[in-house]
Amino acid sequence: MLKLYVAFTLMAMALTSVAKAQQLDYVYSVSTPGEGRLVTVDNYWLLAFSYTYDIRLPEHVSQGDKVMIEIKQDDSWQAEAFTVTAISIFQDLCRLHRQHPSQDGRFPSDAIYIQPCRSD
């Protein structure tokens, strides 16, 4: 468990420094290849744990959409709704955010990472 916490802390520090260097742009809609990675974050008082899943999603997604995604868990696909509150893009990497990153800097929120992807 300590290793997981240390790994997450190092990942968060690296992502913070990368995000500062990346100058993310926010866009209204994107085209996707139909697949991506869902990173869920469980917030606890002092710790945050993340989990990563392969997913399928629509080929066109817009801010405010409530999209149905298929999540691969234990070698089977399960459907779940995901509300897109913000879309950030850097080159061909898009992030569909469940919570807008500027609204809560304390903990990261669930996000779908898509590459390649492009702004519509």
Image (cartoon, rainbow, N blue to C red):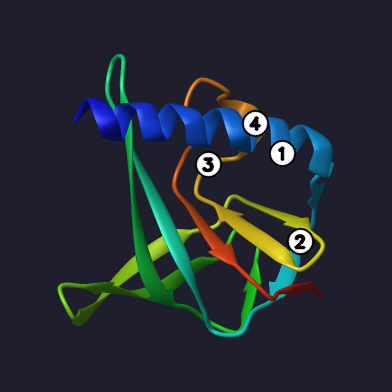
- Residue at 39% across / 34% down in the picture? 7
Which of label 4 and label 3 is nearer to you? Answer: 4
Element on which disc 3 rests: loop
**114 with respect to 72 (left or right):** right
Chain-order first, disc 1 or disc 2: 1
**Viewer can see residue 55:** yes
How packed mark 4 is, by other alpha carbons closer than 10 Å (few <14, some 14-19, many 20 or more), is few
How packed mark 1 is, by other alpha carbons closer than 10 Å (few <14, some 14-19, many 20 or more), is few
Outermost residue on the top side: it is: 46
Q: CA distance from mark 2 to mark 3?
A: 15 Å
The image quadrant that residue 53 belongs to is: bottom left
Please give the label number shown on residue 16. Answer: 4
**Residue identified by numbered label 1:** 18
Chain-order first, disc 4 or disc 3: 4
Outermost residue on the left side: it is: 74
Q: CA distance from mark 4 to mark 1?
A: 5 Å
Q: What kind of residue is marked 3?
A: Gln
- Residue at 31% across / 14% down in the picture? 46
Chain-order first, disc 4 or disc 2: 4
Chain-order first, disc 3 or disc 1: 1
**Residue identified by numbered label 2:** 28
Q: CA distance from mark 4 to mark 2?
A: 23 Å
Asked if the residues shown at circle 3 and circle 1 are in contact, with their CB atoms under 8 angstroms apart, the answer is no
**98 with respect to 96 (left or right):** left
Q: Residue 43 location in percent, x, y?
A: 32, 29
The image quadrant that residue 73 belongs to is: bottom left
